[in-house]
Amino acid sequence: MAKELLAEYPRASARYDEMLAAPQAPRAHWQALFAQLAAEPAERLRERLHDVQRQVRENGVTYNVYADPQGADRPWELDLLPFILAPEEWASIEAAILQRSTLLNRILVDVYGEQRLIKEGLLPPALIHGHAGFLRPCHGAKPPGGVMLHLYAADLARSPDGRWWVLDDRTQAPSGAGYALENRIVISRAFPELFNDLKVQHLASFFATLRDSLAHWAPQDGGAPLTVLLTPGPHNETYFEHTYLARYLGLPLVEGTDLTVREGCVWLKTLSGLRRVHAILRRLDDDYCDPLELRGDSALGVPGLVDAVRRGNVLVANALGSNLLQSSTLLGYLPRLSEKLLGEPLKMPSVATWWCGEPAALEDAIAKLDKLVIRPAFPQLRVEPMFGEDLDERGRKRVAAMLRARPSDYVAQELVQLSQAPVCDAQRPRRLQARAIGLRVFACASPNGYVVMPGGLTRVASADARVIAMQRGGSSKDTWVLAAGPVNTFSLLRREIGPAELVRSGANLSSRVVENLYWFGRYCERCDATARLLRVALARFVDDAPDDGADGRAILVALLRRDDMLPKDAPPPTDPELVAALLSAIADETRPGLASGLRELARVAAHLRERLSLDNWRTLNRMARGRGRRARPAALAEVLVELDGVISAFTTLSGFALDGMTRDAGWRFLSVGRRIERLQTLAATLKLALEGAPGEDLTWLLRLTDSIITYRARYSTRPQWLPVLDLLVRDEANPRSIAFQVGGLRDYARRLEDMFGVIGEERMQASAEALAALDPGADLRHGSARLAAFLDDCSGAAHRLGEQLGHRFFSHVGEASRQTFAT
Amino acid sequence: MRLQVEHETHYQYSSPVLLSQQLLHLSPRALAWQRCHAHRLQIEPVPGELGERDDFFGNAVTQFLIAAPHPELRVHASTTVSVAPREREALARPRVPWEEAREQARSHAAAFLHESPHVETWRELAQFAAQSFPAGRAALDGAVDLARRIHADFEFDRKATSVSTPLREVMKKRRGVCQDFAHLMIGALRSLGLAASYVSGYLLTEPPPGRARLIGADASHAWVSVYCGAGGGWVDLDPTNDCVVDDEHVTLAWGRDFGDVTPMRGVILGGGGQELEVRVTVTPLAE
């Protein structure tokens, strides 16, 4: 069995093999995993693989690849097999990372403070002044606790002799810790017994340390400090991770427009007014953080943030300006700086790097170009790495000329031959393959010094084994660091909460979240109504649909016209024209209809990721995938089945809202959005129905409003105006009636008024009174002017309430700040 | 010379601005050759928050915030300064060959050696600069020649460029305003490895009898300071007027380029369309 696993596994002659000590001989710390794999039939492995893929898909773990035409939301690639590290080996990595983060922090603090390293000649001034990441407005700000580097990541690689090297430092807003956590949750479920037996170190306490340390260094003003996670938004490549970490750490996820600076302090715009923010864990690049003092050409940041930091009124992690250390130019100077600042040699070497800005280094680099890789010296120079070994004679000459023209822009680096580790492929799970890997490890600052995460993100190279980049389609692995002693099983989710920490209201609900919840409600309802309309209209053309809708065609056409799914000023469509219009409304995102509605819904939902439960996500994801799959023109019956699926998905979503969401202000906004939308659609639909022929069959109307079952249970006759209108207008028990929406909206508005003061729900109250005054005998009939006027009134009241809420609670959201200049 | 400077900036918005945060570089620097006697800022509407501090380059910055909706914003800086002549002293300093000045700049003027957001360097610009710097020539003499050539080869044209026009386009069009010429000269010097900074300030609007009226006097002005090596120090040159700066230039602030010392830079929320009017007058006062 073991032989079969290794039948195609390449012997690593030029690489270090992580799993095998010798051919067929796994290293001690890999033996348990290897034995389990060897003992399992292909089918079981395949099951585990599918399980991993399903979890990744359904949890919505994504990584956006900018260059990918499919663009956003590419599923995260995760291999079934963990990367395993033995305790003693980990101990040396941990010590090296601890030392390195301490050193880098010291350098950063010096550069943004006294600049003694420059004055004493330990750092060439060009490394600082030539780096676009040196943010002059941030110079002189005093970092609380002397810490600027709160979260640090290093990319490591192992050379053929088994030594670890640092390839890169991530000092600005390192990504990957959240993915490492998600990988852990998925893979520990794939091998639960093995995970326990091997005593794999847990990750939770690392995150608790990060969170608690931020709170420790945040400015104190008596109360509990509020920490937020600042994201550039859903278009960022690692947005999934932002939402994931926010949820895991229990921090509000905010965008720049959620924050404002007043009196030199940062405030979160919430429903109940401004709330002081004490610490910001940022995932926004530092030059984008403040359009007033830093880059002004972007609306992502918070105007005035730099000043708030300078005045010591907010902690920003990592400190603004820490991108400065993310430069390969620095690597060559670290050994000397370590001796000087820490009094000890650097424990883990950086991959040999020379900055061509030093004349001797330039000539050396040109002389052995074929063994080196040329990389940009500063991140602002967006140049792809150039491998000397790929160049012919002419190419080398060209590169040499390029280096001589602007030597300070480049570094030359030795290539590290990456080590290899086994991966498991779904096609043939019992034939292990080997891939080059790199390890990203993380450290965070704590009042007791740096702490290293016992684990990390193992990144797996794709085709080009010299480069590892998720942007280039690499994959990842969970990283198992085995414990020498007992495992610390602390869990963030199991932390004891005291009575003083009990939270009831959604006090930190930002205006943006509330606005998005409102629109989420509206779009859900809008898509649901559209899907129902399309289903009723399309069912007429499918043979086995119940033949009770011969009439109503004119009104369906009118409804489709109202919603722009049919052209407004055209002669009545022929049947083929109608079918074509329906199909395009279902599938074509560029035209008004279901597809474009679902796209809007997805956009709003993306902004709510951290607020929606995983179940909500799975439902939304399934809906998106269901639509994406259809490549060929579908039969009408298939399209109907698809519409059924969409409608049941919406029923599921509203079920979650009813049963799974806390009745806080956010839920109320979602519900108000739903009901406003439903009231407006229903009123408009009824009005059109009342304008149709009096003798019309009304089955279509009951189907459209999902009220046919109720009707049939109550009346054995075919639908007639009086009972239908009673059910759809006056019946407060029917969740699809006008009365139900009006009563609900009035109640929600009152509850919001209790919390936030007067909103202005008089018109809804007036509608409720008008409804009570309707006389069934006189008004619930075809052609009633009073009923028509009442329906118009309801629509108007719904519209007005929406406006009032928008004006009161979300007027600033969506509006971007902009920069101005005067000379 | 004692000078009175009035600098008025007036924004009119088509709909009210809800929140305005502004940074001002409008106070004169205290310098060996420049003394400020009076400086007053009037801001309408009155800001809710107002503060002052020094920036990275040692310039005074005023920062304010207006949170009440306002349809217009007026900032009026009124300054009385006296400026001493400095051309003769600058020209009398020891001359340092530009290659030496370049070496010394690496440790003495490192902040002003590199590309910056508004100042790009490229091969054509370096070639343009090189014509003024044959081997062994004094840094100052080369820079004076470079300023002369920019003045001769480029045309002053208010309509040709805006704040965001890239330097390459200025080079191609051979037109621009004082800001463009300052950036161009800085870029040319830096492309040779020499250090140069951007100086923002004013020019005397109505010169004393017998002196010519300088270009760019009815607006804020900008010129260049060049590092001329140990002993040569920093010397200010004005490529727009082809002169060594003397006592008709009032210095507000310096930085790597316009972006570091913009007279008024801000972020607003709301406002719709905006109209901007800037007026500057600089008049001599009796001593």
Image (tube, helix red, strand yellow):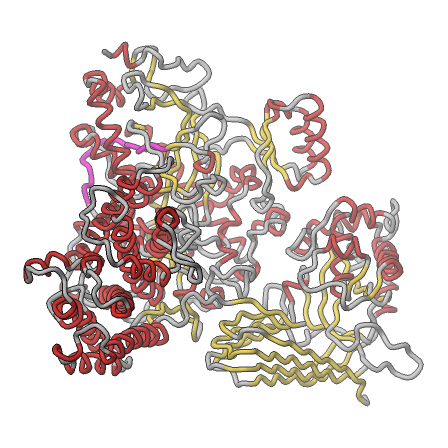
Residue drawn at (28%, 20%) of the image: A429
Q: Is residue A477 above or below residue A25?
A: below
Residue A215 is left or right of residue A310, and the answer is: left
The spot of residue A150 in percent (x, y) is: 39, 51
Q: Which residue is most to the right?
A: B210
Is residue A477 inside the magenta stretch? yes
| Region of the chain picked out in magenta, as a range | A476-490
**Quarter of the picture holding the N terminus of chain A:** top left
**In this figure, what is the number of numbered marks?**
0
State whether residue A505 is above or below residue B147.
below
When asked about the image quadrant of residue A688, the answer is: bottom left
The majority secondary structure of the magenta stretch comes to loop
- Regarding residue A181, the answer to whether it shows in the image is no
Q: B16 or A104, which lies in front?
A: B16
Please tell me which residue is depicted at 33% across the width and 67% down the height of the picture: A220
Q: Taking the image as drawn, is residue A764 in sight?
A: yes
User: Where residue A323 sits in the image (x, y, percent)?
Assistant: 50, 49
Q: Nearer the viewer, residue A461 or A439?
A: A461
Report whether B157 appears left or right of A809.
right
Q: Residue B180: within the magenta?
A: no
Vertical arrangement, residue A673 with respect to residue B35, above or below = above
Q: Position of residue A299 (x, y in %)?
A: 49, 61
Quarter of the image holding residue A57?
top left
Q: Residue B131 vs residue A244: left or right?
A: right
User: Does A783 sit above or below residue A186?
Assistant: below
Is residue B270 toward the left or the right of residue A772 in the image? right
Q: Nearer the viewer, residue A634 or B284?
A: A634
Instruction: Give percent across and percent down for residue A685.
Output: 27, 65
Look at the image and tell me in which quarter the C terminus of chain A lies.
Answer: bottom right
